[in-house]
């Protein structure tokens, strides 16, 4: 019955209009999205900068599961379900830390970083350990960004890697330093967060700080000449400028666009935040904007990277993680001030969070009906079309 309900909704969807209310509020839709989107596609988990040394790990919580992301002895990154293969106890009890080996806190079964069962205490001598290795999930890396898939046979990753690599490589994320990670919980459907970050129709009225930093964000300024001039400079410096659009069968968007003349970084005062990251030679690399459906957003300037990981909890709750990365040589208090580093996106993110929660509150009204997207919201249409297409392919 639930699938029939979702099928009926999908069949009525009209591209160019916002979704009907149940797409945002009904748990049957959320359950279908979990199966057709979050369990099937590549999900951004974090970065290798979070797990510098073998044994360093962090957990990514996904509904009833938590996934252990750990650096192996050979530097490889592994991902396992955080559940012991003996009787199911959680193994890692802290959200991040260091494990030379996994030791289940219940009955002390011991696993290696790659998931291999090393010791099953007090089991018979003829006990075969191999079938009881940790349950692993697929892992792919793109220049220090970690993606995982819960699907047994995940979709091809080549297009994601090809699109993201030239934009991310100059930041040298694998050697970068995690300056700060902050987590937020929004009372809003996860798609509203995705929609909000796919348009700047709202920027002029909602984001004075962002519009002060990014020319054209207010949608009232012509930036064609500046973009053309900057692209020549960027290309001369070996920086990628080719626009990547999400098309049918792909999930990645990538772009480089200019800051306002005189602005050096994403900062409230327009001044640089830290030393240039990785291979960057100055503070004139513009903004790199990256998206990978369904849960990865990134905005980066010459001196820092800001990532956003979106994880739905249920139809009306979304967890959002912000992470700030700086160059490996950058020293807090000398090369950057932590409050200045996080200030810009804390302000902008707080503004966006309120917009998403207001949007969700209004959508729950009996008076809500799907409204038409403006031409400047074409990327929102692309995102919503993609979400509906995944549901259609998964349940019909």
Image (tube, grey):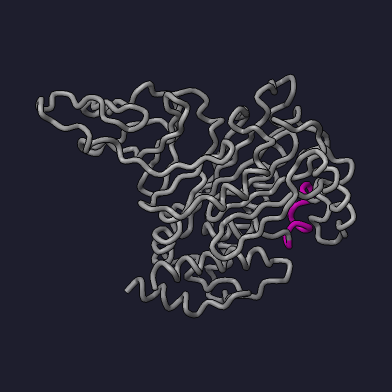
User: Is residue 133 found left or right of 319 in the rendered image?
Assistant: left
Instruction: Give residue 357's quadrant in the image.
Output: bottom right
Towards the viewer: 301 or 251:
251
Q: Position of residue 369 (x, y in %)?
A: 57, 76
Q: Position of residue 108 (x, y in %)?
A: 23, 25
- Residue segment shown in magenta: 201-210
Q: Position of residue 131 (x, y in %)?
A: 21, 38
Whether residue 269 can be seen here:
no
In the picture, the quarter occupied by the N terminus is bottom left
Q: Position of residue 223 (x, y in %)?
A: 86, 56
Tag count? 0
Overall secondary structure of the magenta stretch? helix
State whether residue 257 is above or below residue 103: below
State whether residue 322 is above or below residue 73: below
In the picture, the quarter occupied by the C terminus is bottom left
Q: Residue at x 89, y 41 (%)?
A: 262
Towards the viewer: 301 or 237:
237
Q: Residue at x 59, y 57 (%)?
A: 194
Whether residue 66 can be seen here:
yes
Towards the viewer: 233 or 70:
233
* Magenta stretch contains residue 98: no
Instruction: Give residue 287's quadrant in the image.
Output: top right
Q: Residue at x 59, y 63 (%)?
A: 383
Towards the viewer: 139 or 371:
139
Q: Residue at x 57, y 60 (%)?
A: 192
């Amino acid at each position: 019955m639930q699938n029939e309900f979702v099928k009926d909704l999908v069949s009525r969807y009209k591209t160019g209009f916002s979704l009907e209310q149940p797409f945002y509020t009904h748990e049957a839709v959320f359950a279908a999205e979990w199966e057709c989107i979050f369990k099937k596609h590549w999900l951004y988990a974090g970065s290798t900068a979070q797990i510098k040394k073998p044994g360093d790990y962090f957990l990514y919580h996904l509904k009833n599961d938590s996934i252990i992301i750990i650096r192996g002895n050979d530097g490889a990154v592994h991902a396992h379900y955080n559940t012991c293969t003996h009787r199911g106890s959680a193994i890692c009890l802290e959200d991040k830390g260091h494990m030379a080996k996994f030791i289940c806190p219940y009955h002390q079964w011991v696993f290696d970083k790659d998931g291999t069962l090393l010791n099953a205490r007090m089991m018979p001598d003829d006990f075969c350990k191999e079938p009881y290795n940790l349950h692993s999930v697929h892992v792919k890396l793109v220049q220090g960004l970690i993606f995982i898939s819960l699907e047994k046979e995940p979709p091809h990753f080549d297009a994601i890697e090809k699109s993201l690599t030239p934009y991310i490589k100059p930041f040298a994320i694998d050697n970068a330093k995690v300056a700060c990670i902050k987590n937020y919980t929004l009372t809003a459907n996860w798609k509203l967060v995705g929609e909000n970050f796919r348009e700047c129709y709202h920027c002029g009225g909602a984001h004075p700080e962002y519009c002060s930093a990014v020319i054209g964000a207010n949608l009232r300024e012509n930036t064609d000449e500046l973009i053309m001039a900057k692209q020549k400079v960027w290309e001369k410096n070996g920086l990628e400028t080719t626009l990547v659009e999400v098309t049918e069968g792909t999930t990645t968007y990538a772009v480089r666009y200019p800051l306002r003349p005189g602005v050096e970084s994403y900062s409230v005062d327009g001044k640089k935040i830290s030393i240039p990251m990785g291979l960057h030679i100055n503070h004139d690399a513009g903004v790199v904007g990256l998206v990978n459906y369904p849960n990865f957003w990134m905005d980066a300037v010459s001196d820092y990277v800001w990532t956003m990981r979106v994880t739905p909890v249920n139809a009306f709750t979304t967890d959002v993680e912000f992470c700030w990365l700086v160059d490996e040589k950058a020293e807090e208090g000398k090369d950057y001030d932590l409050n200045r580093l996080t200030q810009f996106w804390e302000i902008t993110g707080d503004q966006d969070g309120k917009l998403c929660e207001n949007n969700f509150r209004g959508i729950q009204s009996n008076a809500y009906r799907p409204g038409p997207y403006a031409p400047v919201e074409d990327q929102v249409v692309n995102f919503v079309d993609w979400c509906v297409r995944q549901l259609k392919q998964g349940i019909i």
